[in-house]
Image: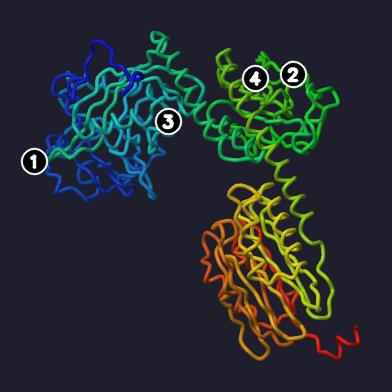
Amino acid sequence: MGSYFAPLAGGNVNGSLRPMFGGDLAIATIMVDSNGRIIYFGPHAEVLTGFRRGTVIGRDIQVLISVPGDNGAKITDLSTDMNPQVHEIRTSDGNTRTVHLYRHPVPQPGEQPAILLMAVDVSDTAEASAGLGLLNGFFKQSSVGFVILDTRLRYVVLNEAMARLNQRSVFDHLGRHLSEVIDPPDRSSYEALLYAVLESGEPVNNLRVPVQTTSSPGQHFVRSVSWYRLTEERERVIGLCGIVSDITDTESAMLQTSQSHSRLALLSKVGATLGISLDIEETAKNLASTLASDYCDVVTVDVVSTTLHGAVVPETPSQDTLVTRVGAAARITIPNATDILTPLPPERPASQTSAFFHALVTNRPQVLQYPDSGVNPDLSLPPLPSGRRALGPHSAIIAPLQARGSTLGALTCVRMAEREPFTHEDLLVISEIANTLGLCIDNARLYRNEKQTAMTLQQSLLPQRLPDIPEATLTHAYRTNRVDLHAGGDWFDTIELPGRRVALVVGDVAGHGIGPAAAMGNFRTAVRSLASIGMDPATLLTRLNDLSHDFGENVTASCIYVVYDPLQHWCVMASAGHPPPVLVLPGTAAEARHVAGGPILGAVPNADYRATSMATPPGTRLLLYTDGIVESRTASFDDGVDRLVRRMRSGLPAAKLCEQLMAESPSAEDDRTLLLAEFHGLNPHMLKARQ
C-alpha cells in the first residue's frame, strides 16, 4: 500500500455488529423496492420472524409489518420523517414482536430508490433498550464515522458523523462511488486494498489514510479507518463496513508528506498536459483546466501580445506593453463561472493591474493574500455577481513566464474563500509550473514563426499563375493541410518548350516545414533548368534523382513529368514513384494510366527511369495530382483514385471540377495539389500563321 497508508498501534474491529451493541440484540435487515415489495431478507430477519426468505421475497412488506390505514406508504415514502419508528412485526407462529425500524434509501440505477430497513428487536426491554440507545446514538450522535459500501464501493448506509467528516450530507453520499467523495493520494492502491478485503474477508484495522474530500479540495486530513467484509446467507458477499475517525491533529507529519505527494502528483499531471501541443492557446487552456480542476479555483494565462504576433518580445516590459489572455478556467459552482470570472479580453496594457505588472518587471513570483475576500484590486478579474461576493479571492499567486532570457507573460492562480490560502510551498510549485509553461509557450512561438516562414517560402516558390497558351487550357488548385496549416513539399509547374511543346510537372517532397519547402524550390528550379536544355522525361528524372542527393540529407520526393506535343497530339511522361495520372480521351471513359518510371527521387542512387508515350488527341483531359488528394489515414489510395476517375467522367468545366475534387479530398494532414490540362492541339496551318 505504500507509505501513505499506515496501521495504528492497537485497536481492533470485530467482524460482527453484535458486540457493538451488547448481548444478543437482534438487528434484522430487510430491503424493499419503491412499491413496498420485499427484495432482500437477511439471516437475522429469518431468526427474528421465523419466516424463511423464500416465503416472503417478492411479497408486500405488509405481510410482516402492518401499518393501519396507509397500506405501508409511510415505510416507502422518503419524504416522511426518517427517524426510527416503533412497529409490531409478525412472526411465523402468529405472534408479533415490537421493533424499532430504521430506514435508509438505497439508490437504484434508473429506478426509484429501494429502502433498507433495519429492525431492532426491543421485546426484551432492558437489554434491548440499552442496545437501541447505543444504535440510535451511533447513527445520530457518535463522533466516529460509520459507513457501509456495496461490492462496487458505493455508499449504501452511513451515519451523521461520517457525513460531517466528508463534508457533504448523508443523502448526497448515497449511490456515489468512494472516489467521488474522498481523494487519497494513492487512490488506486487504496481501492485495491478494499477490494482485497472483499475478496479475502481479512479485515483491515486502524489504517491511517491521508485524504482530501472532493467537496473541499485543497484541505488535507488524516483518517483512521477500519474495514471488514459483510456477508449474508450462504456467505454471499454484500459489501464492506467501515469505521472512520479523524486524527488530523495528531498526524501533522503524515499530513505534510501527503501534501508533498499531492504537489508531486500535480507536477506530473501538468508535465503530461504541457507536452501535447505546440499551439499557444491550446497549451494555455489545457494547463488552466488542469490547475482549476483540484488545485485552485481560478487560473488565467496572459502573454505579451508580441508573442502571438511573431514580433520580438521586449527584454523588459514597460507600462505600455500590451498583454493578451490566452487561457483561463474557473472551478466555482455558479453558472458560466469561467465566462464570468475569466473572460478573454482584447489587448490591454500590462500596467492595468499592479501585481501583474510587478511580476513581469521583476521576474519574481509573489503570493497575494486578501483578508477581505470580496476585493481583488491587484488581479485582472471582474467582480463576482451580487450575492456571491463571499466566494471572492482571498489568496493568489502570480508567477512570470520566462524562457531564454525573455519574460513572455504571467500565470495567475487564485483560491477563493472556501479553500486554504496558498503557502510558500505552493509558490514554489506554481513557479516551477510557470517556468515549464514559459518554455512551452516560447517553443510554440518559435514553431509558429518557423511555420509562417515555411509557408511564406513555399508560396513564393510556387508559380503565381499559369501561362495562357492556345495549345492547352491549364487549371490548378493548391491547399495547405487543414489541421495546422503546415507548409508542405507539394509543387507544380508548367514550362513552355521549343516547338510549341508544353511540359507539365507535379511533385511532392516528403515532410513539412522549412526544409521540405526549400527542397521543393530546389527541385522546381532543377526541373526548369533540365527542361530548358531539351531533356526527355526519362533522362530528366534520371538526372534529377542524381541532383536530389545535393538538396539535403534524406530528402526524397515523388514526381511526374509530362511533355505534350500539340502538333503530333502526343504525350511522353515518366514517373518517380508518383500517383498515376487520370486520362480522359474524347469519346472514351476516364481511366488511371500506369506510367513507366522508377523509384522516388533521392531514395536510390544511380537509378534509371523509363518513359511512357500515348496519343492525346484534341479534347483530351489529363489530371496530375499529389497523394493528399486521394488518401489519408482513414481513406485508401485505391479508393481515392477510383473516386477521381468517376469525377473525371462528369465533364464538368475545368475550374468547377478542380474545386469539387479539392473539396472531396480526404487528407486533413497533408497539402494537396491538382494540375488539370485540356489539350487542344495545333495544326500546321496555325503554326505557319503564327510564324
Callout 2 amino acid: Ala
Q: Is residue 5 left or right of residue 351?
A: left
- Relative depth, front residue between 95 and 184: 184
Q: Label 1: few (<14), some or many (≥20) within 10 Å?
A: few
Q: Residue at x 73, y 37 (%)?
A: 344
Q: How far apart are marks 4 and 1 (CA)?
A: 73 Å
CB-based contact (under 8 Å), mark 3 and mark 1: no
Of pointers 3 and 2, the one earlier in the residue sequence:
3
Of pointers 4 and 1, the one earlier in the residue sequence:
1
Mark 2: which secondary structure?
A: helix
Q: Which of the 4 image quadrants contains residue 490?
A: bottom right
Residue with the mark numbered 3: 181
Q: Say which mark, if any, is on residue 93.
A: 1
- Relative depth, front residue between 180 and 525: 525
- Residue lying furthest left in this view? 93
Q: Say which mark, if any, is on residue 397.
A: 4
* Residue 400 versus residue 513 in the image, above or below: above
Of pointers 4 and 3, the one earlier in the residue sequence:
3
